[in-house]
Amino acid sequence: MTQMNITGRATRIAIIANNKYQSRRVASKLFAAFKDDKDFYLSKKNPDVVISIGGDGMLLSAFHMYKKELDRVRFVGVHTGHLGFYTDYRDFEVDKLIETLRCDKGEMISYPTLKVRVTLEDGRTITSRALNEATIKRIEKTMVADVVINNVKFERFRGDGLSVSTPTGSTAYNKSLGGAILHPTMEALQLTEISSINNRVYRTIGSSMIIPKKDHIEIIPKRQGMYTISVDNKTVHYKNVAKIEYWIGSKKIHFVASPFHTSFWERVKDAFIGDLDS
Ligand code: NAP
């Protein structure tokens, strides 16, 4: 069978693995399967398909490596541990993955990403994109910040910080913060508090909020000082942040549609509940 992509050339495949022994073994097996196959071309440059081997953390790294090429790249994840949320294959299912790619017709499943723009007091702006979430925390003291949703000044937050997550990120840090789990096909953001202060004087909503696709979130810090801004697995410290804005980006992450795709609720159960019969 000839596996050409829509441009008529061989499918370019990038294989990215973490340093775990099991991940390197899976990578070797995939290299061996594709290296002499004229329908595929192994290259980390301009790939059509990125195979990430490791876990959800590794897929996050692969996303950041190729985030400028989201329009043309499809991802596929192999987990060398448990089931995972961004991974359709386990390490013992590599043959199924090879089969899927040999029969691939370019089908994909796509999920929203989060755009983040930080504006510093000197006017500089830094824009980035998250797959899981972006958080802001104040380092030295309590963070005091106004939360504005679609131009409505919603609340004055006091606490450690705030997180805005994507639907697929809802099972990550967001869940540890007490946020809800969203099905990844729901195009919405989730704003979640990180240790808010709530007493007779200071008040925040207290629960996480699901914000629809059309809405825009702004967080305006009210104190000068150092702020820690994390976008997925990258953390940067900024002095004197004027505001940070969040919205659902126009670009989505695309995954190779897999006939072996495990139901989202099965993954949630596997990750957080386990076997009911044990
Ligand atoms: P990491 O080691 O890459 O990831 C930390 C854990 O989060 C790993 O067990 C990873 O799963 C899991 N994870 C990543 N994305 C997930 C998702 N969408 N749903 C469910 N679990 C997910 O750590 P890192 O490099 O510092 O940061 C990456 C991510 O870790 C962040 O985006 C954040 O969501 C998460 N994190 C969570 C907490 C927390 O829960 N308290 C704190 C900080 C960061 P694998 O084992 O499959 O890689």
Image (cartoon, grey):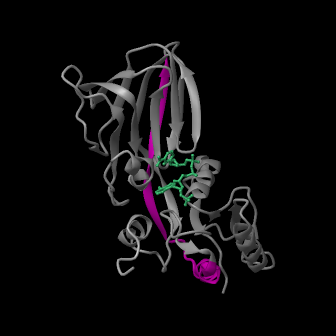
186 to 263, vertically: above or below: above
Q: Residue at x 55, y 22 (%)?
A: 238
Quadrant location of residue 194? top left
25 to 112, vertically: above or below: below
Q: Residue at x 38, y 68 (%)?
A: 264
- Residue 76: x, y in percent? 57, 66
87 to 139, vertically: above or below: below
Q: Quadrant of the C terminus?
A: bottom left
Residue 247 visible in rendering: no
Is 85 positioned to the left or the right of 2 in the image?
Answer: left
Q: Residue at x 44, y 65 (%)?
A: 271
Residue 98 counted in the magenta span: yes
Q: Residue at x 34, y 45 (%)?
A: 189
- Residue 155: x, y in percent? 25, 26
Residue 81 visible in rendering: yes
- Residue 90: x, y in percent? 58, 74
Residue most extreme to the front: 278
- Residue 127: x, y in percent? 52, 32
8 to 224, vertically: above or below: below
Is 278 positioned to the left or the right of 51 in the image?
Answer: left
Residue most extreme to the bottom: 1
Residue 97 counted in the magenta span: yes
Give the residues drawn in magenta, as a range: 92-120
Is 83 positioned to the left or the right of 268 in the image?
Answer: right
Q: In front: 10, or 37?
A: 37
Q: Quadrant of the N terminus?
A: bottom right
